[in-house]
Image: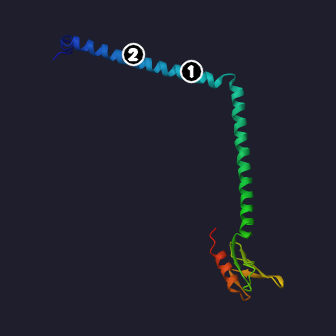
Amino acid sequence: MDIYKFIADNMDIIQLATVIALFIFLILVLIIFIKISKMKKRYKIFMQGSDAKSLENVIEEKLDQIEMLEKKIIEIKKEIDKQNEVLLKTYQKCGIKKYDAFKEKGGKLSFALAMLDKEEDGFIINSVHSTREGCYIFIKEIIKGKSFLGLSNEEEEALTMATKTII
């Protein structure tokens, strides 16, 4: 078949296809033109009051600020680590047991207070109150949750409360 004859026989179809393709290309060109127009507007807003040199200065300033902030973050992390070390040595666990030491009518004015750090080191203060003789205060050292001195039932309860405290 001769190509010239094929084109001549199908000229209407070829013209229609060309018009459709031209119409599609025209729409695509309009879409691209609209997008370029929007991009130009954004660029003008971005560059408003700035030239390339001043924009470079702004970028350098921002980079300097970022560098300063990174240094500050490192300092803050070091300070937090120091605070965490101090916090580990503070008394974080506590237990208290109030009781009536002498079964008097005075009420439960005696108490045993256990204060422990994270490693369960600390002390127990026992305040024994009597309406006749006043108040006596005893302190016992606690190491790893244990006392080397004998503990009363109330002191044991206070120590148990403190060791069960979750931090």
Identify the element where label 2 is drawn.
helix
Q: Mark number for residue 26?
A: 2
Q: Position of residue 50 (x, y in %)?
A: 69, 24
Q: Residue at x 71, y 56 (%)?
A: 77
* 30 up-or-down from 166: above or below: above
Q: Residue at x 67, y 75 (%)?
A: 162
Rounded to the nearest angstrom, the CA distance separating label 1 from label 2 is 21 Å
* 5 up-or-down from 64: above or below: above
Q: Residue furthest right?
A: 133
* 68 up-or-down from 106: above or below: above
In the image, 79 versus 140, the foreground residue is 140
User: Considering only order in the chain, which callout, 2 or 1, is on the residue closer to the N terminus?
Assistant: 2
Q: Residue furthest bottom?
A: 150
In the image, 154 versus 5, the foreground residue is 154
Identify the element where label 1 is drawn.
helix
Q: Residue at x 72, y 31 (%)?
A: 57
Q: Residue furthest front?
A: 105
**Residue at the disc numbered 1:** 40
Dot 2 crowding, Cα within 10 Å, few <14, some 14–19, many 20+: few
Q: Which quadrant of the view contains residue 157?
A: bottom right
Amino acid, disc 2:
Leu
Amino acid, disc 1:
Lys
In the image, taking residue 113 as reference, residue 161 lies left or right, namely left
Figure quadrant of the C terminus: bottom right
Q: Position of residue 148 (x, y in %)?
A: 73, 87
Coloration of the structure image:
rainbow
